[in-house]
Image (cartoon, rainbow, N blue to C red):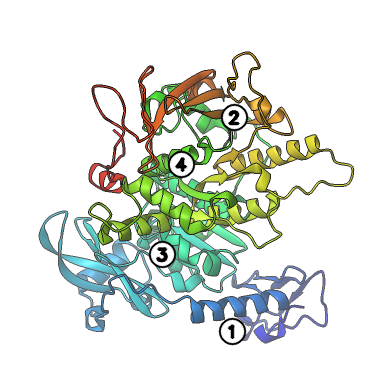
Amino acid sequence: MRNFHQHGIDTRGRTSGKIKTICPQCNATRGHKGNKSLSIDLEKGVCYCHHCGYKLYVPDDAEERERQLRKEKYNRANKLPSHFRRPVFDPTRTNLSEKLERYWTQERCLAQHLLADLHITEERVKLPESNEEENCLCFNYFERGILINTKYRSARKHFMMVKGAELIPYNIDAILDSPECIITEGEFDAAAFMTAGRKDVISVPAGAQSNLNWMDRFVETHFEPKKLIYIAVDEDNAGQSLSQELVRRLGADRCRLVHFGPECKDANEHLVKYGVESLLITLAQAEEIPLEGVFTAEDRQDTLRTLFENGLQKGAETGWKNLDENCTFETGRLLVTTGRPGEGKSEFIDELVLRLCLRHEWKISFFSPENMPMDYHLAKLSEKLTGHAFRPGPGMTDALYNRVVSWLTANVTHILPDAGSYTVDCILEKARQLVRRRGVRILVIDPLNRIDQQLEAGQTELQYITSLLNKLSRFALQHKCLVILVAHPRKVNRNPLNGELRRVEMNDINGSANFGNMADFCITVDRNDAKEIVTVYIDKVRFKHLGSANTCAKFVYNRINGRYWPCEEGIVHRSDGDRLGPTNTVHDNENWLKNIAEEGCLFD
């Protein structure tokens, strides 16, 4: 049931269908009182007045309970992070100069009352771009009435935010309980929609950037419940990249893309050029994301033109030059890796995904029961990142420990469902949530045999495996993730003549040849104990622009820090990590986190 009565709406006892009734918003001011201008869809809870434009969504009882629980949980448990710097709001700075108010109302055409509603202030500060003190319009970022950050903007379009303060969406409190919201790329654009009468508007905090970590804390409370989300960012290349990432995180089914008028790249320019009514029309005409699974060449014209002009490009590199020359990676793909037990499949995949994350900011999620307890796995990842054993010492200082824990917290998550829930559907649902909430781009499932097999009635093992691989491939494509599946092979017998073990191939994986047939990448990890050499066989790369199949890359495994180091053919390596040769590259203990901070990229 939906409680229309509490909003002053008389549904005349009807509980289903569509009706028209008196609008509680404008009826008292109308000359012809009692005119039924309010249309209501009783089943959907949507109300719209054709006279005054009043819009209302009335939730049902279950939605209202969820909303109250969500709000209580947010107010009770979601404490503001304490490790950020907190600026102090000075209400005396809300006394604005005539010049600033004239700029706001006349040049930007924004409603004057918003200066007070949004707590706009004015201040002279020294800005880093000019290294001079400039007079600034200050956008103050509040959450639950607490000042979290401030963006300073000068007349010369120089910007600065409070150093050490948290990045949060601008005007975030306005969308806590709203069924819809509008996301803009700047504070002026948010104010433009507020000038047009919308309150449920936020702005991204730092312009068009692909890093949306600022969303993470608000996904569950502010974004998950939304029925409709308008993406109203700038219509330039950077804005379109931001739009694509927002749609990926928030879900295409509920997102609408807002387009602005000729010669207007954003909402504020549209307001200035075409006015309030026209800006509202851009919402009414917002573009739906194309129907999933149905395309024409016109739907793909932008990417098709880019492909036509630029050709196929290599994928993401790892920094292992001997691997990169034959295999590069892209999201939307399924990688299957195999190898004999104990020969380093998991260790190799751990380093592979860490390298992709460090170089390309692809966040990682592991479903890896064999790496439990989780602390052990995190310790192994730490050793690969720092080059030092995971224990206090000259190399692994407290400062480095804190830094690696911070990096792992920001970039790595582990999926460990409740006991009895290790099904592929449960794992992929958790991963879907992590794509939305944390921007995950790599999902590692290690290994396959720890997933609970739930064969349907009459389903064979071959049919089950085919269905599972289809689910993983669809997830990778739909969520633009690189999905990595580690699968154990069946027992490989020794050659009866010389007693040697042949290398494992994709067809040796238990259950089906479809592991090789359906994957986009196939990699086999094989270790030669006599030479201490690990050979990574690249058995399949589906698309030739990403690499070449039937090739290999050779590595030596560093037992000190768990890293794989490219090695030359014919070099003999000792089991203690030393090697017989003119140089020693095995004991590589670089701090990769230090390198990426100072140089901007790893392994250049």
Q: On the image, numbered disc 2 is attached to which residue? A: 520
Residue placed most toward the observer, 154 or 197: 154
Of circles 1 and 3, which is in front?
3
| Looking at the image, residue 551 lies above or below residue 234 | above
Q: Residue furthest left?
A: 132
Pointer 1 residue:
29
Q: Where residue 225 is drawn, which disc sits there?
A: none
Labels 2, 4: front one: 4
Q: Mark 1 belongs to which amino acid?
A: Thr
Tell me residue 145's x, y (percent): 39, 80
The percent position of residue 592, horizontal first and vertical second, equals 30, 44
Closer to the eye: label 2 or 3: 2
Q: Is residue 508 left or right of residue 441?
A: right
Q: Image height check: is 420 above or below 462?
A: below
Front-lying residue, 218 or 362: 362
Q: Name the residue that disc number 3 marks.
A: 169
**Spatial CA span between label 3 and label 4:** 30 Å
The type of residue carrying mark 2 is Asp
Residue type indicated by callout 4:
Val
Q: Earlier in the sequence, mark 3 or mark 4?
A: 3
Above or below: residue 404 compared with residue 100: above
Q: Earlier in the sequence, mark 1 or mark 4?
A: 1
